[in-house]
Image (cartoon, rainbow, N blue to C red):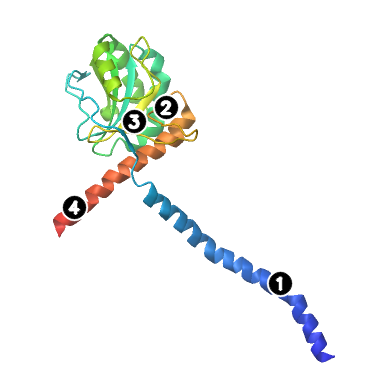
């Protein structure tokens, strides 16, 4: 009778013990699983794919202060405002808030917006507004002809086009070796060459993530270089 009582007690308590151990196992294993998931993600997506090589250099352009502008040895967010600087103010603010403000102090990071030579006054007005968001020291507007703007755009070899004012809503990531970076397969399985600056969510999520990947890649390369020199 006594053994029967013990058996009943064990059967009654067993589900509680099993539940307790299951909860403890989940609490122990879940952080490890999450860590392994993100660790594998870092390894698989350590570099943003190169979509186009040898993007045309900006030899035909000068910045608003008259100094030359170049892609080489810089990580660049490239935009095309053409003759539509006034109409693209909202795009410039989106980019300033979500991309530029967080990254402009990275030594080799810059924004370059290609504009028509007729847009000097509009650029000055826009830079005053951008100064309220973050120091626009690396938010550069490069002046050139519509033909020069088209030449740079065509060298990207994307599936898009500039409009009649040499402008587009898309902005692009160019690395230090003048390569266009992007996604070989986006959510809809299409190649993502650039990001729609009029789409706040796309800038805040996709582009922000991809900029972080590119900057992290060069930070890691710099760290490895310094380590080798110290050795």
Q: Which of disc 1 and disc 4 is earlier in sequence?
A: 1
Mark 3: secondary structure:
loop
Percent from the top left, x then y, of residue 51?
Answer: 32, 33
Residue at the spot x=30%, y=45% of the render?
217
Q: Are marks 1 and 3 in contact (CB under 8 Å)?
A: no
Distance (Cα) linking label 1 and label 3: 58 Å
The residue lying toward the viewer, choosing from 86 and 193, is 193
Q: Which of disc 2 and disc 3 is earlier in sequence?
A: 2
The residue lying toward the viewer, choosing from 37 and 159, is 159
Instruction: Indicate which label's residue lies in the foreground, 3 or 4.
Output: 4
Residue at the spot x=78%, y=84% of the render?
7
Q: Which residue is mark 3?
A: 134
Mark 2: secondary structure:
helix
Distance (Cα) linking label 4 and label 1: 56 Å
Q: Quadrant of the N terminus?
A: bottom right
Mark 4: secondary structure:
helix
Residue at the spot x=39%, y=17% of the render?
88
Distance (Cα) linking label 1 and label 2: 54 Å
Residue at the spot x=25%, y=18% of the render?
151
Q: Are marks 4 and 1 in contact (CB under 8 Å)?
A: no
User: Could you tell whether 5 is left or right of 106 in the image?
Assistant: right
Q: Which residue is mark 1?
A: 16
Q: Which of disc 2 and disc 1 is earlier in sequence?
A: 1
The residue lying toward the viewer, choosing from 45 and 137, is 45
Distance (Cα) linking label 4 and label 2: 35 Å
Percent from the top left, x then y, of residue 68?
Answer: 17, 23
Q: Which residue is mark 2?
A: 94
Distance (Cα) linking label 3 and label 4: 30 Å
Q: Which of disc 3 and disc 1 is earlier in sequence?
A: 1
Q: Which residue extends farthest right?
A: 1
Q: Which residue is mark 4?
A: 226
């Amino acid at each position: 009778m006594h053994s029967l009582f013990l058996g009943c007690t064990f059967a009654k308590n067993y589900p509680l013990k099993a539940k307790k151990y299951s909860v403890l196992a989940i609490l122990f294993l879940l952080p490890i699983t999450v860590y392994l998931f993100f660790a594998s993600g870092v390894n698989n997506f350590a570099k943003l794919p190169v979509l186009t090589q040898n993007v045309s250099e900006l030899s035909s352009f000068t910045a608003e202060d008259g100094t030359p502008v170049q892609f080489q040895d810089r990580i660049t967010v490239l935009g095309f405002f053409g003759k539509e600087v006034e109409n693209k103010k909202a795009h410039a603010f989106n980019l300033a808030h979500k991309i530029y403000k967080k990254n402009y102090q990275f030594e080799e990071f810059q924004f370059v917006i290609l504009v028509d030579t007729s847009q000097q006054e509009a650029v000055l007005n826009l830079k005053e507004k951008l100064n309220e968001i973050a120091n626009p020291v690396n938010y550069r507007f490069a002046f050139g002809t519509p033909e020069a703007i088209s030449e740079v755009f065509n060298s990207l070899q994307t599936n898009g086009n500039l409009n009649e004012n040499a402008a587009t809503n898309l902005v692009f990531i160019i690395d230090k070796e003048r390569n266009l970076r992007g996604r070989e397969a986006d959510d809809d399985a299409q190649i993502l060459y650039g990001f729609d600056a009029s789409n706040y969510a796309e800038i805040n999520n996709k582009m922000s993530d991809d900029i972080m990947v590119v900057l992290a890649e060069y930070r890691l390369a710099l760290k490895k270089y310094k380590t080798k020199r110290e050795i």
